[in-house]
């Protein structure tokens, strides 16, 4: 018998060790892939930006490059250069300037041709593949191609992972979209969830409680994609009509869906916290002449406040990590939201929507893994806060 007990104990220890190691390896892999983004160049891999060597501009950040190629910056003096208009020259445009014979069979004359163009037009910025520019000589120079920096990721205001010549991986629109949808969902779900929890714990009889609790558990078991379809077919047209807006896929719509999905978590944990209130406290309140409602909001709820707070934190975690339902009803606009009736993009939705299109090992692929790191840190912080609050509740009960 002792041998069997020791064997079971060893198996349990091994299972715990294996689980811990697997989780640790997943975390290491996640951060290893994600932080590879900061070893990637600002300009698309394999390409370079070339200007006249007399041009005082030495480097450009991703936002400036994007603005130049979008025509938002049209003069060199806007980025520290001379007062000259910027002229863009892309690789495919070189074929309209020179014939195939002039460029050479293997483009061996291309560097000299580019030198000729840049020497005659000092205001040019050329975007060319590096393999065709093996040697750079005066008057041509390559703009310093630095690696993507942490500030570009954390403080960037645009998420444009496929733009050329410099993709933008600004996380601010995604973080704001995630927080807006999640916290608005909790604001909607909290009054309903807390009300149901109080009813089940303090007012409902056993028969009613036996009917409502299975319904709540069923609500928790519905797949998120079903919630997404429900929101897309039912809630989106209602929001569009009531808000008199062009499209009903908004942050508010996503919040409504997430509020429904967060209700089971809030109700279950809040009810457990309320029911854990010692009977002696209730009886003492009644003995002092308090009514049932006075006892609920002056004794029971204050005592269970830690558990209710934990329910709120876990509800936020549930909302932040949701993917499919949010992906289907928020419009997926990766822009900084200024209203709850605008399209937004959340971090989980971005990963789900773009990972299948990102080349493995590429810059876009690494950026999505880094988004996973950010999401992991969000949920980790929420879990720690929830654990601290739950421990306070346990200590109070003891």
Image: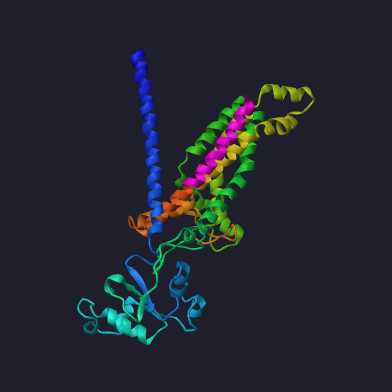
In which image quadrant can residue 103 be found? Answer: bottom left
What residue appears at the point 42 percent right and 83 percent down from the top-left corner? 123
| Residues drawn in magenta | 376-398
* Residue 313, percent from left and from top: 57, 41
Pick the residue in front: 189 or 369: 369
What residue appears at the point 27 percent right and 79 percent down from the top-left corner? 110
Main SS category, magenta section:
helix
What residue appears at the point 56 percent right and 38 percent down from the top-left corner? 386
Residue 393 belongs to magenta span: yes
* Residue 255, percent from left and from top: 56, 50
Q: Is residue 351 left or right of residue 46?
A: right
From this viewpoint, is residue 275 visible? no
For the rendered model, the colour scheme is rainbow
From this viewpoint, is residue 380 visible? yes
In which image quadrant can residue 388 be found? Answer: top right
Residue positioned most to the top: 1
* Residue 95, percent from left and from top: 29, 81
Pick the residue in front: 237 or 165: 165
Residue positioned most to the right: 289
Is residue 147 depicted above or below 108 in this figure? above
Residue 282 belongs to magenta span: no
Which image quarter is the C terminus in?
Answer: top right
Q: In this view, does 300 lie to the left or right of 378?
A: right
In which image quadrant can residue 163 be found? Answer: bottom left
Residue positioned most to the bottom: 120
Which image quarter is the N terminus in?
Answer: top left
């Amino acid at each position: 018998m002792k041998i069997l007990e020791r064997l079971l104990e060893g198996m349990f220890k091994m299972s715990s060790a294996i689980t811990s190691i697997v989780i640790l390896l997943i975390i290491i892999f996640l951060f290893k892939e994600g932080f590879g983004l900061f070893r990637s160049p600002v300009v698309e891999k394999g390409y370079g930006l070339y200007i006249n060597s007399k041009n005082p501009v030495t480097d450009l950040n991703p936002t400036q490059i994007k603005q130049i190629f979008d025509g938002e910056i049209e003069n060199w003096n806007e980025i520290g250069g001379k007062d000259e208009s910027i002229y863009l020259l892309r690789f495919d445009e070189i074929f309209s300037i020179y014939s195939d014979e002039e460029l050479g069979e293997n483009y061996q004359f291309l560097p000299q041709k580019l030198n000729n163009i840049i020497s005659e037009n000092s205001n040019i910025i050329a975007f060319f593949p590096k393999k065709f520019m093996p040697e750079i000589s005066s008057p041509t120079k390559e703009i310093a191609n630095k690696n993507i920096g942490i500030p570009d990721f954390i403080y960037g205001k645009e998420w444009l992972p496929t733009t050329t010549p410099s993709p933008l991986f600004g996380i601010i629109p995604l973080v704001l979209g995630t927080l807006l949808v999640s916290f608005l969902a909790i604001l909607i779900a909290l009054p309903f969830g807390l009300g149901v929890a109080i009813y089940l714990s303090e007012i409902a009889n056993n028969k009613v409680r036996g009917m409502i609790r299975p319904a709540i558990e069923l609500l928790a078991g519905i797949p998120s994609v079903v919630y997404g379809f429900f929101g897309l077919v039912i809630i989106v047209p209602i929001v569009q009509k009531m808000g008199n807006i062009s499209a009903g896929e908004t942050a508010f719509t996503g919040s409504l869906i997430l509020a429904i999905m967060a209700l089971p978590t809030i109700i279950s944990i809040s009810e457990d916290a309320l029911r854990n209130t010692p009977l002696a406290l209730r009886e003492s309140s009644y003995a002092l002449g308090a009514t049932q409602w006075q006892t609920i909001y002056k004794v029971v709820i204050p005592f269970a406040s830690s558990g209710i707070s934990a329910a709120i934190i876990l509800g936020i975690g549930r909302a932040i990590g949701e993917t499919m339902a949010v992906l289907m009803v928020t419009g997926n606009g990766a822009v900084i939201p200024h209203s709850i009736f605008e399209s937004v993009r959340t971090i989980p939705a971005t990963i789900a929507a773009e990972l299948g299109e990102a080349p493995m090992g590429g810059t876009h692929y690494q950026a999505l893994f880094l988004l996973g790191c950010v999401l992991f840190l969000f949920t980790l912080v929420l879990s720690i806060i929830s654990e601290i609050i739950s421990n306070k509740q346990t200590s109070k009960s003891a």
